[in-house]
Amino acid sequence: MNESDNHPDRSGLVLPILASAAIGAIAIGVGLYAAGRTPAESTAAAVPAIATEEYGRQLVAHTAELLGPDQTDPSRRLTDSRLNCASCHLSAGTEPGALTLLQTDEHYPRFSGRAGGMTDIEDRINECMQRSMNGRPLAMDSPEMIAIATYLRSLGAIYEATGTAQRQANDPPAFTTPKRAANLASGERVFDERCRICHGPDGQGLLAAEERRKGYLFPPLWGPDSFNNGAGLHRVLTAARFIKARMPLGEPTLSDDEAFDVAAFINSKPRPEMAGLERDYPDRALKPIDNPYGPFADDFPLEQHRFGPFQSIAAFYESQKRP
């Protein structure tokens, strides 16, 4: 029995007090920038952990509004897209399955072929900021970096505390790569039949409100507000796995062929370009077979790396492995 059990008249005050403290701390964290203070002039040291986690969740869920190009404070315009992290990491990353963030903490630090070295959660956040969000890296000591990293690490404890049934992903069978090149015309038909109702006939998404700063209810799949060509989703097999697992939203019923073709159609469209991609994967043999930009450690044409067929590329790299 704890103290609150002995004093029931006090217990009703605990949550409101904690909530008030958390809300106040979040307001302080957000207000530091509103007052024109830079990350170097403030740290999260004075912000309770519960508030830091909540600020991180807000940043993941409402990235466009808090860090997007329509911010009134120019110092906080850190993304050039109007996507949210939650545009792909559904429910702010708390749903099991494809692109979940629930187990992020246990996967880092780890080696990254793209970076050519060991990376941690903060490095991964900045990769997403620069690629998927088409923006700029967060300062490592900034309230935003500390908050997002704290939030992601907190999800591991949430995952461990959930029951086995709640941990199970409600995804369809995993995507299997078709043994052919993607068919863009078929992909366009799939898009028109299954995707355009949410993402728009021109793939430019559906805004969440009249104010663009609020971002999108359904994100743009190409164009200036979408992810750039250095993002993971610009790889057709990565995109197809996500599409097969989660799209159409709430009714993921596409076949492998449909997911493959529509992923290729989406990634054939123009999008922002990231500078310096030739520096990715210092060891070119570690570059994914569907990477849409060179240089490569093989002689397969760029078009095949983009749209397949992928089996011969995979076989080539398999043959290069030492026994």
Image (spheres, helix red, strand yellow):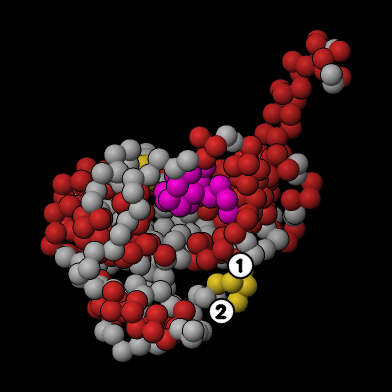
Left or right: 244 with respect to 43? left
Left or right: 68 with respect to 307? right
Chain part drawn in magenta: 84-104
> Residue 203, located in which quarter of the rendered image?
bottom left
Q: Residue furthest front?
A: 323
Left or right: 169 with respect to 122? left
Which mark is drawn over residue 110?
A: 1
Which mark is drawn over residue 49?
A: none
Q: Amino acid at mark 2?
A: Gly
Left or right: 303 with respect to 153? left
Q: In terms of depth relative to the viewer, which is nearer, 181 or 174?
A: 174
- Residue at the (32%, 41%) spot, across then down: 249
Q: Amino acid at mark 1?
A: Arg
Residue 110, horizontal then vertical, whole percent: 61, 67
- Residue at the (42%, 65%) spot, across then down: 232
Residue 28 lies within the magenta run? no
Q: Quadrant of the N terminus?
A: top right
Residue 133, horizontal then vertical, whole percent: 45, 59
> Residue 75, located in which quarter of the rendered image?
bottom right
Q: How many marks?
A: 2
The answer, for residue 277, to whether it is visible in the render is no
Q: Which residue is mark 2?
A: 116
